[in-house]
């Protein structure tokens, strides 16, 4: 069973930064971050390939968020800068074998999520 564990969420003021971490499996998985705000569907945020060469971002976070990984530590990071109130959501880490994808259904393994709240 593959287990993912997110950490790093919290409360931050608009314009601030947070870094989320995902303890990911030590296998050749691509990893994605998704988020879900109250009353909304879960949506794609960013993804990174196993080797870290390929990344992809949702338009809403492009230029503000960065994704990278340290495979020696089996950890994927989501650096979030210039946070906005609309970034408030539960953030989930997800993993899949193969290349990166943007669909929720494309990922087989999910963490429990970490809350990010951005105050105005």
Image: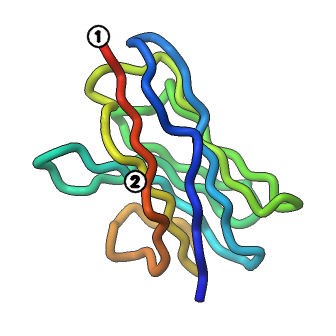
User: Looking at the image, which residue is at 40% across and 42% down?
Assistant: 115
Residue 34 marker: 2
Q: Nearer the viewer, mark 2 or mark 1?
A: 1
Q: Rounded to the nearest whole Å, what is the CA distance between mark 2 and mark 1?
A: 22 Å
Horizontal side, residue 26 vs residue 114: left or right: right
Q: Which residue is mark 1?
A: 120
Horizontal side, residue 102 vs residue 6: left or right: left
24 over 66 or under it: above or below:
below
User: Looking at the image, which residue is at 65% across and 55% down?
Assistant: 54
Q: Residue furthest bottom?
A: 1
Q: Residue furthest right?
A: 72
Q: Position of residue 80 (x, y in %)?
A: 53, 29
Quarter where residue 48 is shown: bottom right
Quarter where residue 74 is shown: bottom right
User: Looking at the image, which residue is at 71% across and 66% down?
Assistant: 50
Horizontal side, residue 4 vs residue 46: left or right: right
């Amino acid at each position: 069973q593959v287990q993912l564990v997110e950490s790093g969420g919290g409360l931050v003021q608009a314009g601030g930064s947070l870094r989320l971490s995902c303890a990911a499996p030590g296998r050749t998985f691509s990893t994605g971050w998704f988020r879900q705000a109250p009353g909304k569907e879960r949506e794609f945020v960013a993804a990174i390939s196993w080797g870290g060469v390929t990344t992809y971002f949702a338009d809403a976070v492009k230029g503000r968020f960065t994704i990278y990984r340290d495979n020696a530590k089996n950890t994927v990071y989501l650096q979030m800068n210039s946070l906005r109130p609309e970034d408030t959501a539960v953030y989930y880490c997800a993993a899949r074998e193969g290349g990166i994808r943007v669909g929720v259904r494309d990922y087989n393994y999910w963490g429990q999520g970490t809350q990010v709240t951005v105050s105005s």
